[in-house]
Image (tube, coloured by chain):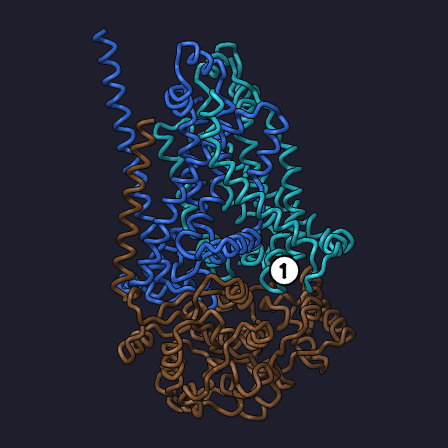
Chain colours: A cyan, B brown, C blue
Amino acid sequence: MKKSFRAMFYTPYMMWLALFVIAPVGLIVYYSFFNISHQFTFDNYATFFRSGTYLTMTANSVLYAFLITLISLLISYPMALVISKLKHRDLWILLVILPTWINLLLKAYAFIGLLSHDGLVNNLFELVGLPAQHMLFTDTSFILVASYIQIPFMILPIYNSLTDISDSYIKASHDLGATNWQTLTKIIIPMTMPGIKSGVQIVFIPSLSLFMLSRLIGGNKIITLGTAVEEHFLTTMNWGMGSTIGVVLIISMVIVMLFTNTKRKRGRN
Amino acid sequence: MKKFIIAIVVLLAICAGLGLGSHELTKSTGDSSSKVLNLYNWGDYIDPSLLTKFQKETGYHVNVETFDSNEAMYTKIKQGGTNYDLTVPSDYMVQKMKADHMLIPLDKSKLTGMSHYGASFMNKSFDPGNRYSIPYFWGTLGIIYNDKYIKPGELTHWDQLWHSKYRNDIMLIDSARDIMGFSLISQGHSVNTTNTKELIAAKNKLNRLSPNVKAVVADEIKMYMAEGEAPIAVDWSGEATEMMSQNAHLHYVVPTEGSNMWFDNLVIPKTAKHFKAIYAFLNFMNKPENAAQNAKYIGYSTPNTDAYKLLPKSVRDNKQFYPPKQVLDKLEVYSNLSAKKVQQYNDLYLEFKMHH
Amino acid sequence: MSNRSSKLGKIYIVIIFLLLYMPILYLIIYSFSKGTTMTNFRGFSLTHYGELFHDKRMLAIFLDTVLIALLSSVFSTIIGTLGALGISNAKRERSRQTLLSLNNILLVSPDVIMGASFLIFFTSLKVPLGFWSVLLSHIAFEIPIVVLMVLPRLDEMSPSLINAATDLGATSGQVLSRVVLPFIQPGIIAGFFMAITYSLDDFAVTFFVTGNGFTTLSVEIYSRARQGISLEINALAGIMFVFSLILVIVYYFIENHNLVSRRKKDKLGVANQ
């Protein structure tokens, strides 16, 4: 494509990068070098890397984000696979997105109602004769509810890459005597890797900084980096420390990106 | 390509329709008139029918915008770009905003009805002489318990929360000052202490509370308690009224060794423009019948003593929400600490939360 | 797929769909409760819907929210798609990687940081806070998700397709509109829907950059949490949900109908030749 033509098209995106990404990041990095009394300092970074508090928190966040991503991937992949085989598949995929249009706080409140001690799930348990369980404020329920929130974001990119695979590949594979399982592991999954990778990025990265759910469903027994940022910006008003954590989050995002690096496959032909 | 262009045009047309619709709706509520007052308030923190009544009496239309924490409100007003005429910070925030020159002093000559307020609610340490603020609602920090699990009268002291029989039974409100505060009180210290030793002792004591703590949550605590999720909670009186109206088994106590007393206050931020409307509104809210109507709607305790007299007897006689003088004397208001000290409170509190 | 596994698959998606919709059904059921909270159901009533229709402020907020969601999604989808084209055209692997990392920064930044830095940005540029600042911010944080949805499709596209088109004498514009766009269309649509999702869900950023009487539903809901969220909000969520459900289904069948009739026409055309 011609250069001038290209430039005209990419200008808005580059402007966006400059104004809404690079400028705010510059601001965050700048703030991360100031303490609460507005003096220049490296203390924020020293605090972060020296105190066990923040390192434990980072480890926790990574662990939980990993589990949430894994669970949503395990649930989403078969889901996307089945939907991509349905007759009205585009409609079904829209129906997967629809629940995300309801406010997160409202859904979290609904989960509180469902999972609480006298809630619906326990009532069902009682009907079956099981004793009532304490389900709220456990790691399990936190991870499950967070996965619930993330599943649509995982299904969509996987579904998109599934619909790319033309039927002829699958037919060919069957003609060559491959079983369903072999077709899945040798053909379908490798061909949908780009979708899986972008799903992992879309889910893992925001999961590092969850704070609303870790409080509502996890009862703040799980403190993630997101909780700490929230606290530093809105409670202690120590924007310096909050920004420092932000910088750490951005760096870890870049690391994740490197791990899920998509080497460009230029076409299949 | 054609399809995309059609889609974009259709979507933009829908947007135009929506914009028109919302414009019509706001116009019908009178937003566009020149006689306005911009109130920056907590969500759902004023009886909407009072706003209609105010407009009928004075002709000023009140635009309400909402915030969900003192600090968020502070950031917005400090950055400017807004035109709020009145806002409702809590006690320590009044002091902080005052220190940062973000408030305009009240012109007492334009105020009427200040005599309706009780002496115990005026002239507090966060704003001596009420130069900047008029109390809006007040309350305490206390313990809420469910009588299905806890005998009434069993809990009267902060120290009892540490008892091993309440294992995994307690929910705490997610607020550094309040949680550190009750630990400090239980050790006989002030909630405004700046003594590092006392603060560390308070945190260590909180760490020992960990096995009893079920969760540390915010506003949702109301829902959890109403659901019977935990037998005990530490929360503010305002939240307690809300829960108790939903679940008759819940009760509220202010521990005998004392507690925090909080105030939400009407103040004029530096962004204010419509001063005639501001004083009309303040005077309107000072009137006992209006303050009483608001208190009935919100359910918090009103500092307007003459309004209190207009409330139903069942509310007036409730000693937990309108405590007698000897209890009031033991309550302490938070003062605004230096940034470093606030940081220390918060760091220690974060360590406690991580202790689980 | 064999019959048995497709039956298993159907059972599986039915279960997942039930789980996905359970909290929403729960919300909607409680919007019909006589009580005032989402804790115990107190008998059927329509009072909350009545309240809602008399609450003009709430309805205006609702319309504004949808307006911002649609408008910002349109713009972010356009800019994001162009951006994805740019990234996929990047010559060197390293510049691609850099662009992608920059792209994803807003996805990883916690909302509060984003909101606070946007606020500083707008106030220092003297942009008045309100509709426009909210719209700009929403466009800003929706762009990266659009890019992430479109990019894998572009990566899948074979360059021989473009080469063939150029060899046949197509201009850049024609290549884009006849070859590239149709191929990446599913990604664009997915990006658009994700953008709507992000817009409707955002609280923190909107909170910081709004002002002068403009509010969205999320901000209103979060700031009401202190007093307890009234079931009026459930009613609104319920209506919004049913409305979008109908919209999605109608959209799908119109789209589908068009496709089918166009295919028929194509076939006729082929027959006539």
Quadrant where the C terminus of chain C sits is top left
Identify whether A192 is placed above or below A93. Answer: above
What's the amino acid at mark 1? His
Identify whether B182 is placed above or below A120. Answer: below
Q: Residue furthest top?
A: C273
Identify which residue, C38 or B36, lies in the foreground.
Answer: B36
Q: Position of residue C111 (x, y in %)?
A: 54, 52
Q: Chain of mark 1?
A: A
Identify whether C107 is placed above or below A82. Answer: below
Whether residue B338 sits left or right of residue B244 in the image: it is right
Q: Secondary structure at mark 1?
A: helix
Q: Position of residue C270 (x, y in %)?
A: 25, 10
Instruction: Identify the residue shown where x is 65% and y is 33%.
Output: A258
Q: Quadrant of residue B288?
A: bottom left
Instruction: Identify the residue shown where x is 41% and y is 47%.
Output: A101
Q: Looking at the image, can residue A213 be seen?
A: no
Mark 1 closeness class: few <14, some 14–19, many ≥20 residues within 10 Å: many
Q: Looking at the image, can residue C58 be seen?
A: yes
Identify which residue, A8 or B320, lies in the foreground.
Answer: A8
Query: How many numbered marks, from 0 up?
Result: 1
Q: Quadrant of residue B306?
A: bottom left
Instruction: Identify the residue shown where x is 29% and y is 62%.
Output: C56
Identify which residue, C44 or A106, lies in the foreground.
Answer: A106
Q: Position of residue A198 (x, y in %)?
A: 54, 33
* Residue corresponding to mark 1: A232
Instruction: Identify the residue shown where x is 34% and y is 72%.
Output: B48
Q: Position of residue C53 (x, y in %)?
A: 27, 61
Identify whether A21 is placed above or below B306. Answer: above
Whether residue C194 sits left or right of residue A201 in the image: it is left
Identify which residue, C118 or A162, lies in the foreground.
Answer: C118
Whether residue C58 sits left or right of residue B246 in the image: it is left
Quadrant where the N terminus of chain C sits is top left
